[in-house]
Image (spheres, helix red, strand yellow):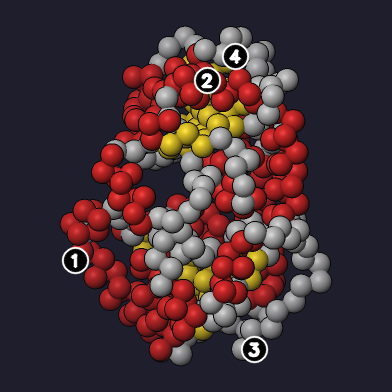
């Protein structure tokens, strides 16, 4: 994959339509609520007269959205949970259609959440509503046939990964990349007053074990066991906001601290990290923390995923740079000894430490500048 460094000062795109007045935002997950809220703030800076409705959470509400349905009524993960809630999901489709009509919406802004949003894209487009998609479904990993639905029913696609534009180009669809919203989140955090919560008396190994209960239970003991082998390090575990702090007491010991709602503060101080695959790998990289990436699920889940998901890497850092920058320990390779062995390579003065830092610099260049939400808002209202 050809690596292109993105700059945006001269980028303009004309979507050939009238500027929207009544926008409906559909975000079905917590990450979508976060990124949509930042986009809403920028939209209202440009045009404070906009009427913005939607489905989402507290962050969207605080940003100025009239939230008509809460996240707790929208997020269903896994085949079984979807099956058990099929009547509720059908009602959600009905409610969404009714609200789009009754609120006289001219633009619908879909945020990730593809199972629901792509169906709404088709319905809205056929009703004459302008369809904008923010945060592309990961169709490059699986369900590539969804690209034809997007090409037919989505008027503007804003991606958050630079290689996604190239993917869409192969299918003769023009998608747009204006930067990753994490750059804005981290920039805002770093501009705030630095927290004194974590006193760095010793080097810190940060553990980011994920947010799903089963994945934490499966991997966290291995991560802690590996970290304990690093002499002279303080171990700090980032707790998922959706799991109660009491859940982590089973892993409590004198050698371990727990950080809830303070992941960025932890990464500010960390020397190395052990990270579950996903967005956290990119966040860790943007804080310039060398890391080992881990993934371990049940045999059946892993087998099914291997059949469906066709990607070379599981970490966003490796996917974006299109090479094995970070070590990925998957399934049987994810043992405490293997994690420890890889940690030794990326501690200060480790064999791979300088290389990882150098690759992180290239990653930042490739992602471009902060300000993605502002640039996208400008395009939506142009």
Cα distance, mark 4 to mark 3?
57 Å
The reply to whether residue 40 is visible in this rendering is no
**Distance between mark 3 and mark 1 Cα atoms:** 39 Å
Q: Which of the two labelled residues, at mark 3 and mark 2, occupies the earlier sequence position?
A: 3
Q: Nearer the viewer, mark 1 or mark 4?
A: 4
Q: Position of residue 24 (x, y in %)?
A: 47, 74
Q: Which mark is residue 16?
A: 3
| Residue of label 4 | 233
Location of residue 352 with respect to 283 vertically, above or below: above
CA gap between label 2 and label 1 equals 47 Å
Contact between labelled residues 2 and 4, with CB atoms less than 8 Å apart: no
Q: Earlier in the sequence, mark 4 or mark 3?
A: 3
Is residue 274 at all visible to an observer of this figure? yes
**Residue at the image position 54 percent from the left and 21 percent from the top:** 341
Q: Position of residue 376 (x, y in %)?
A: 65, 68
Which comes before the other along the chain, label 1 or label 4?
A: 1
| The C terminus, quarter of image | bottom right
Determine whether label 4 and label 3 are within 8 Å by CB: no
What residue sits right under mark 2 in the picture?
340
Instruction: Please give the residue where the numbered disc 1 appears in the rendered image.
Output: 87
Q: Secondary structure at mark 2?
A: helix
Pick the front one: 135 or 105: 135
Whether residue 340 is situated above or below residue 115 in the rendered picture: above
Earlier along the polypeptide chain: callout 2 or callout 1?
A: 1
Between marks 4 and 3 in the image, the one whose residue lies nearer the viewer = 4
Residue at 52% across, 12% down: 229
Residue 306: percent from left, percent from top: 36, 50
Q: Which mark is residue 115?
A: none
Q: CA distance from mark 1 to mark 4?
A: 51 Å
Question: Left or right: 264 with respect to 367?
Answer: left
């Amino acid at each position: 994959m050809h690596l292109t460094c993105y700059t945006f000062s001269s980028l303009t795109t004309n979507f050939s339509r009238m500027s929207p007045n009544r926008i409906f935002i559909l975000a079905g997950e917590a990450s979508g609520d976060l990124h949509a809220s930042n986009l809403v703030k920028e939209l209202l800076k440009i045009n404070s007269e906009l009427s913005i409705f939607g489905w989402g959470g507290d962050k969207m509400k605080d940003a100025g959205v009239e939230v008509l349905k809460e996240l707790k009524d929208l997020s269903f993960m896994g085949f079984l949970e979807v099956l058990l809630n099929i009547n509720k999901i059908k009602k959600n489709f009905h409610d969404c259609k009714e609200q789009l009509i009754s609120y006289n919406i001219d633009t619908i802004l879909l945020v990730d959440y593809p199972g629901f949003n792509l169906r709404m894209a088709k319905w809205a487009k056929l009703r004459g509503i302008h369809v904008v998609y923010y945060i592309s479904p990961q169709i490059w990993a699986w369900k590539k046939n969804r690209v034809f639905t997007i090409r037919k029913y989505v008027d503007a696609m804003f991606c958050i990964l630079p290689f996604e534009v190239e993917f869409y180009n192969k299918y003769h669809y023009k998608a747009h990349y204006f930067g990753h919203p994490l750059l804005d989140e981290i920039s805002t955090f770093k501009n705030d007053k630095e927290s004194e919560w974590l006193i760095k008396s010793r080097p810190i190994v940060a553990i980011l074990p994920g947010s799903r209960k089963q994945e934490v239970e499966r991997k966290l003991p291995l991560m802690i066991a590996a970290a304990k082998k690093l002499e002279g390090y303080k171990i700090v575990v980032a707790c998922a906001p959706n799991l109660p702090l009491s859940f982590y007491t089973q892993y409590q010991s004198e050698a371990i601290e727990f950080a809830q709602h303070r992941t960025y503060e932890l990464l500010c101080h960390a020397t190395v990290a052990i990270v579950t695959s996903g967005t956290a790998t990119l966040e860790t990289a943007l804080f310039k923390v060398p890391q080992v990436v881990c993934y371990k699920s049940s045999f059946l889940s892993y087998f099914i995923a291997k059949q469906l998901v066709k990607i070379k890497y599981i970490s966003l850092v490796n996917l974006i740079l299109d090479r094995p920058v970070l070590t990925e320990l998957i399934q049987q390779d994810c043992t405490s000894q293997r994690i420890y062995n890889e940690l030794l390579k990326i501690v200060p003065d480790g064999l791979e430490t300088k290389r990882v830092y150098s690759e992180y610099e290239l990653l930042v260049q490739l992602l471009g500048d902060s300000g993605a939400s502002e640039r996208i808002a400008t395009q939506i209202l142009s």
